[in-house]
Image: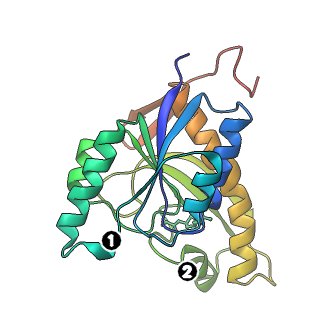
Amino acid sequence: MPVKRIAVLASGRGSNFQAVIDAIARGEIPASCCGLITDNAGAYAIERAKKAGIPVYIVDYGAYPVKDAYEQALCRVMKDLSADLYILAGYMRILGGGIVKHFHGQLMNIHPALLPGFPGLHAQRQALGYGVKVSGCTVHFVDEGMDSGPVIIQACVRVEEEDDEETLSARILALEHRCLPEAIRLFCEDRLIIDGRRVRILPGSATSPER
Ligand code: GAR
C-alpha cells in the first residue's frame, strides 16, 4: 500500500503529535509526516518535530492583521505540503470555511470529550461541571461547525468521585494517544468512508495490525 503523506497542526504541548510520530516510527501507520504547522512560535510541538526530523511551518497568528490574512497564509502552507491528511492535534483555533471546504474529507480533529457533548474549549472542565459520569475523547472529520464533523472513533473513561480537571484530563489524554494514531491508521489504509453524518469503517486486510 502506498505510504500516505500526513501533516499535523498543533498549537502547544504536542503530546498527541508525539503519539503519532511514535506510531509511525513503530510501523503502525503507513504514512510519513511531511510537516508540523503551528500558529504559535512558542509551541513545544516544534521541539518534538525537530527531534523527529519533521519540517516545521510557523504561521504566527499574531503576525497577521486580520483572521482572513492568517487563514490565507495557512491555506497556502497546507496546499504547498499537498498532504493526503491534515490532523488537528491540539490546534486551538477554528479553521475558516475556505480551508474546510477545500480540504473536505482530509481534515481530522481530536477532541477531549464525547461529542456532541462539550465542544469547544475546556471540554474536561465542562464535563465535570455538568456532572457526567462518563467522558472520553472523539476523533472526527472536520466540517464547518465547531467540533461537529462525522465521528471516526470514540473511547470513554469513567468520571470518578475524586476527579478534578487535571486527573480527568490526564486519563482522557492517555486514551487520545491511542485513538488518534488508530484513526490515522484507518485513514491511511483507505478504510474510512464518509457517508453523510456517519463514518463507515471498512474491514482490515489480513496484514492489518489488529488481525
Ligand atoms: C488535547 O487534549 C486535545 O484533545 C485538545 O487539546 C489537547 C492538546 O494536547 N484539543 C482540543 O481541546 C480541541 N478542541 P497536546 O498538545 O498535548 O496534544
Residue at screen point 24% across, 46% down:
101
Residue at screen point 73% across, 63% down:
157
Local crowd at mark 2 within 10 Å, few (<14), some, or many (≥20)?
Answer: some
Q: How is the image coloured?
A: rainbow
Residue, disc 2 = 126
Disc 1 secondary structure class: helix
Specify whether 145 is left or right of 12.
left
| Placement of 64 over or under 17, stated as above or below | below
How many labels were placed on the picture? 2
| Placement of 4 over or under 7, stated as above or below | above
From the image, state whether disc 2 or disc 1 is nearer to you.
1
Specify whether 189 is left or right of 147.
right
Residue, disc 1 = 61
Local crowd at mark 1 within 10 Å, few (<14), some, or many (≥20)?
Answer: some
- Is residue 198 in sight in this rendering? yes
Residue at screen point 72% across, 84% down:
164
Queried on whether the Cβ of the residue with tag 1 lies below 8 angstroms from ligand 1, the answer reads no
Q: Position of residue 40 (x, y in %)?
A: 44, 70
**Image quarter for residue 166?**
bottom right
Specify whether 91 is left or right of 1.
left
Disc 2 secondary structure class: helix
Q: Position of residue 80 (x, y in %)?
A: 30, 40
Q: Position of residue 112 (x, y in %)?
A: 58, 65
Q: Earlier in the sequence, mark 2 or mark 1?
A: 1
In front of the other: 201 or 97: 97
Queried on whether the Cβ of the residue with tag 2 lies below 8 angstroms from ligand 1, the answer reads no
Name the residue type under label 2.
Gln
In front of the other: 45 or 96: 45
The quadrant of the rendered image in which ligand 1 is seen is bottom right
Residue at screen point 38% across, 34% down:
195
Quadrant for the N terminus in the image: top right
Name the residue type under label 1.
Tyr
